Image (cartoon, rainbow, N blue to C red):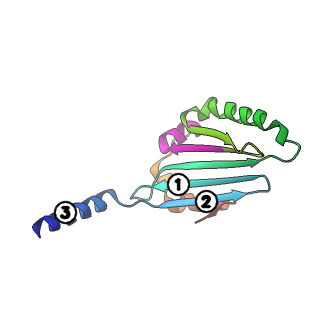
Amino acid sequence: MKVISKVFLVFSLIFLLTGCGKKLTCTQSTDNETMTVDFKFNSHNYLESGTLKFDFKLNDDQKADLETYKEAITKSFNEGNYKDLNVTVSDNKKDTITVKMSFDTNSLSKALNIEIKEAQATYNDLKKEITASGFTCK
């Protein structure tokens, strides 16, 4: 019984010390584009990391140039400020190009060329800002 109590105590302390951070998923869509952002927050409700996904749907007269658009998008994300982010570009071989980007606060700060302070990236503040930009969050 003492062993079970000790194990329970250890797991309780780990949970209390590390916390169980929140997640926030926000989406914005237009006719040809969908952007989804998944934010992860630490136990103090400050932004820790996230992923960003863009789906670009080409219209009928652009479909023949799918590979050209994909190469141009790949080149633009592999240069400049975005090179510190983990970016992948793929397509469905028909009409959609998908860009996925993973980030933490350090890589995002470099990409945006600003210092992101914890106080600027709380769960509530970020949700308020992104919904004001037209995103729907859950």
Marks 3 and 2, Cα distance to the nearest angstrom? 38 Å
Above or below, 75 against 106 in this view is above
Element type at mark 3: helix
Above or below, 48 against 82 in this view is below
Mark 2 highlights which residue? 26
**Residue at image coords 52%, 50%:** 50
Marks 2 and 1, Cα distance to the nearest angstrom? 8 Å
- Judged from this view, the residue extending furthest toward the bottom is 1
Answer with the quarter of the image where residue 19 lies: bottom left
Marks 3 and 1, Cα distance to the nearest angstrom? 32 Å
**Residue at image coords 48%, 55%:** 40
Mark 1 highlights which residue? 39
In this picture, which residue range is highlighted in magenta?
99-113
Mark 3 highlights which residue? 7
Horizontal and vertical percent position of residue 135: 66, 60
Q: Residues within 10 Å of mark 3 (few under 14, many from 20)?
A: few
Above or below, 117 against 75 in this view is below
Tag 1 or tag 3, which sits nearer the N-term? 3
**Residue at image coords 57%, 61%:** 127
What's under tag 3, amino acid-wise? Val
Quadrant of the snapshot with the N terminus: bottom left
Q: Is residue 25 left or right of residue 57?
A: left
What's under tag 2, amino acid-wise? Cys
Above or below, 15 against 118 in this view is below
